[in-house]
């Protein structure tokens, strides 16, 4: 099954178009691999966001995206697994929902299909899930193009990004960053084309230019200048100046920063009461990374005697915060 068929199948499930038998087949597909589940969760987040009030990014053309969406849709038949029954009307349904779906897509991150793969452009700090199961944190202004085909996983990066690569020994992950190639199997690291650096947190990474090559392991860093590599330096990665809070660890952090980090980690929107100075309203905790958003909201509720409402799966509104 082609990737677009997977995409259409997920939309059919989310729209309630599947029969009970088709739902069972969908659930079997979902449980078949981590990459299937990653893809489902990515599309589900975008789908849910279609009902939000987010503002369209200035650099996004909804008209062009809609036209491209429909052109791609018309060029592929409905998935073979779900041609019978109500799914025959899938294209009609997608035409009706395409405009609002694409507007939601733009609100999360500027994203498009191209002949060479997927393209992402971050107007703010963004976390994206690639189709191979890898996660990427992109800093503001970063652009990433990704292609997964056969035994190849290739990315082209401009800007600064933190990669958490899904391990696959049969398919190395190769990043082209200007004149530099970064090759990995499964690891965590930063590539910064602006500063010309590669910094490894876990695993092993090979950095290559036209003139040199080096292997980096955990807590090692190298700089690139005119296709030459500096001497490898060693420093605790935890001391790195990170532009996001991956582990959701807080140390006397102002409440609005806590909320901002939670929003980015979970891809949600939390509305705070306006006109408040949050600098003296602080929060300290160990890592909340492996907690569900429901658990984190409960923790905040107990800590701050919080009152909030949940509009939908991606939108919360906090109406009361009592700082101690």
Image (cartoon, grey):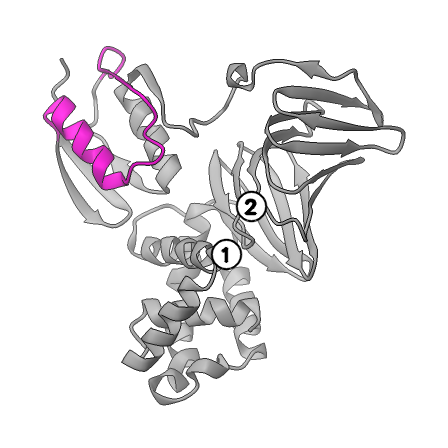
Residue 291 part of the magenta-drawn span: yes
Which residue does the image show at 45% across and 71% down from the upper left?
8
Residue 292: image location, x then y, percent:
28, 40
Q: Find the residue positioned furthest to the bottom.
A: 84
SS of the residue under disc 2: loop
Which residue does the image show at 68% across and 20% down from the upper left?
221
Left or right placement of residue 221 versus residue 1 in this view: right
Q: Is residue 189 shown above or below 82?
A: above
- Residue 284 shows up from this direction: yes
Residue 107: image location, x then y, percent:
42, 48
Q: Is residue 7 shown above or below 304?
A: below
Q: Which mark is residue 275?
A: none
Which residue does the image show at 61% across and 13% down from the upper left?
235
User: Viewer-proximal residue, 205 or 317?
Assistant: 205
Residue 266: image location, x then y, percent:
35, 40
Residue 71: image location, x then y, percent:
57, 73
The residue that mark 2 highlights is 166
Q: Is residue 28 shown above or below 251?
A: below
Q: Find the residue positioned furthest to the right.
A: 211
Left or right placement of residue 106 versus residue 232 in this view: left
The residue that mark 1 highlights is 35
The magenta stretch spans which residues? 277-306
Which residue does the image show at 48% across and 46% down from the upper left?
109
Q: Find the residue positioned furthest to the front.
A: 169
SS of the residue under disc 1: helix
Name which quarter of the figure residue 74 lies in. bottom right
Quarter placement of the N terminus: bottom right
Q: Are marks 2 and 1 in contact (CB under 8 Å)?
A: yes
Mark 1 crowdedness (10 Å alpha carbons): few <14, some 14-19, many ≥20: some
């Amino acid at each position: 099954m082609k990737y677009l068929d997977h995409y259409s199948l997920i939309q059919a499930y989310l729209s309630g178009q599947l029969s009970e038998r088709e739902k069972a087949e969908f659930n079997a597909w979902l449980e078949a691999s981590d990459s299937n589940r990653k893809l489902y969760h990515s599309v589900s987040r975008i789908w849910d966001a279609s009902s939000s009030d987010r503002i369209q990014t200035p650099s996004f053309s909804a008209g062009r995206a809609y036209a491209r969406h429909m052109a791609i849709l018309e060029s592929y038949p409905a998935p073979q697994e779900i041609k019978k029954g109500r799914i025959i009307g899938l294209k009609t349904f997608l035409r009706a929902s395409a405009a609002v779906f694409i507007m939601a897509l733009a609100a999360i991150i500027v994203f498009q299909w191209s002949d060479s793969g997927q393209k992402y452009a971050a107007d703010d700090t963004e976390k994206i899930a690639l189709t191979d199961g890898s996660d990427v944190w992109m800093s503001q202004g970063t652009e990433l193009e990704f292609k997964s085909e056969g035994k190849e996983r290739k990315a082209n990066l401009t800007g600064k990004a933190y990669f958490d690569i899904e391990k696959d020994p049969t398919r190395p992950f190769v990043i082209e960053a200007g004149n530099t190639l970064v090759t990995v199997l499964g690891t965590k690291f930063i590539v910064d084309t602006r500063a010309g650096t590669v910094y490894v947190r876990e695993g092993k990474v090979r950095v290559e230019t036209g003139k040199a090559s080096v292997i980096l392991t955990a807590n090692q860093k190298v700089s690139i200048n005119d296709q030459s590599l500096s001497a490898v330096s060693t420093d605790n990665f935890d001391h790195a100046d990170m532009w996001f809070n991956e582990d959701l660890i807080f140390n006397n952090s102002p409440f609005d920063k806590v909320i901002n980090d939670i929003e980015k980690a979970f891809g949600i929107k939390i509305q705070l009461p306006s006109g408040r100075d949050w600098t003296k309203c602080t929060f300290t905790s160990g890592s909340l990374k492996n907690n569900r958003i429901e658990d984190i909201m409960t923790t905040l509720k107990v800590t701050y005697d919080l009152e909030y409402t949940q509009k939908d799966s991606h939108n919360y509104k906090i109406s009361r915060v009592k700082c101690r």
